[in-house]
């Protein structure tokens, strides 16, 4: 299948959000609350008229998707890029072409293409700032064989999820990361 075929198979943003059973309120909160930074406005406005399309590999249970999908949707709306959403586990043939570090099915993955379906850029699953935060949080956990590991990991992910849904600095880090990447290919 070509990228255009995958795009045609995907859901619109509205259909994806309607299908969500996890993180829907949080995703909608970020979508409604995020303020686009000046540089992102400038770069994504410059991209208007490119007629690009974006295939998004995602899943509603994923915290990174909860954070990145609404921010990216806002940016794509500004640029006039059409987006389509595919659930990762239902589309492993495509997912396995976009593994993080060549091994991980980490999501979300945003695949940008031109009108002819030529890949122009790929972004995801996290901004460097979000990666730094999760790496630091994981480093503070006890070893996996520690009896408290499961509870401490659950607490850590709960705290981290709250940060992702409320911290505008984190939101900006996503915008800055994808904006920097887009500037390289425009």
Image: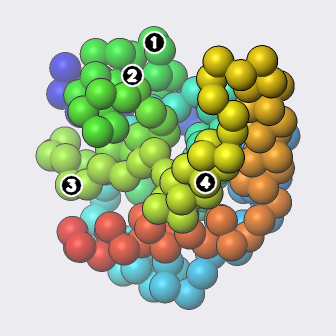
Q: Give the CA separation, mark 4 to mark 3.
A: 32 Å
User: Answer yes or no: do the residues labelled 3 and 1 have beta carbons within 8 Å?
Assistant: no
Marking on residue 9? 2
- Mark 2 packing: few (<14 Cα in 10 Å), some, or many (20+)? few
The correct choice, above or below, for 112 with respect to 117 in the image is: below
The correct choice, above or below, for 140 with respect to 77 in the image is: above
Q: Give the CA separation, mark 3 to mark 2.
A: 19 Å
Residue 177 in sight: yes
Return the x and y of residue 116 as percentages of the image width and height: 15, 45
- Residue at the (60%, 46%) spot, across then down: 139
Q: Mark 3 points at which residue?
A: 120
| Element class at badge 1 | helix
Return the x and y of residue 29 as percentages of the image width and height: 82, 52
Question: Mark 2 or mark 1: which comes first in sequence?
Answer: 2
- Mark 4 packing: few (<14 Cα in 10 Å), some, or many (20+)? few
Q: Which of marks 2 and 1 is in front?
A: 1
Q: Nearer the viewer, mark 4 or mark 2?
A: 4
Left or right of 23: which side holds 1? left
Q: Mark 4 points at which residue?
A: 136
Return the x and y of residue 182 as percentages of the image width and height: 32, 68
Q: Give the CA separation, mark 4 to mark 2.
A: 38 Å
Which of 99/110 is in front?
Answer: 99
Q: Give the CA separation, mark 1 to mark 4.
A: 31 Å
Q: Give the CA separation, mark 2 to mark 1.
A: 11 Å
- Mark 1 packing: few (<14 Cα in 10 Å), some, or many (20+)? few
Q: Mark 1 points at which residue?
A: 90
Question: Mark 3 or mark 2: which comes first in sequence?
Answer: 2
Question: Mark 4 or mark 2: which comes first in sequence?
Answer: 2
User: Answer yes or no: do the residues labelled 1 and 4 have beta carbons within 8 Å?
Assistant: no
Kindly give the residue lying farthest to the top in the view shown: 90
């Amino acid at each position: 299948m070509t990228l255009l075929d995958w795009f045609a198979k995907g859901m619109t943003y509205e259909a994806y959000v309607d299908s969500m059973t996890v993180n829907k309120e949080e995703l909608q909160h970020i979508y409604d609350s995020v303020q686009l930074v000046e540089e992102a406005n400038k770069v994504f406005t410059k991209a208007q008229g490119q007629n690009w399309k974006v295939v998004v590999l995602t899943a509603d249970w994923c915290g990174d998707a909860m954070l990145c999908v609404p921010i990216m949707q806002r940016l794509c709306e500004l640029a006039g890029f059409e987006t389509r959403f595919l659930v990762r586990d239902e589309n492993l043939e495509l997912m396995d072409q976009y593994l993080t570090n060549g091994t991980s099915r980490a999501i979300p993955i945003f695949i940008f293409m031109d009108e002819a379906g030529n890949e122009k850029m790929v972004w995801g699953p996290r901004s460097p700032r979000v990666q730094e935060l999760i790496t630091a949080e994981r480093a503070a956990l006890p070893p996996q064989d520690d009896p408290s590991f499961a509870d401490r990991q659950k607490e850590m992910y709960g705290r981290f999820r709250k940060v992702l849904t409320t911290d505008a600095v984190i939101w900006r880090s996503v915008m800055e990361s994808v904006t920097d990447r887009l500037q390289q290919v425009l």
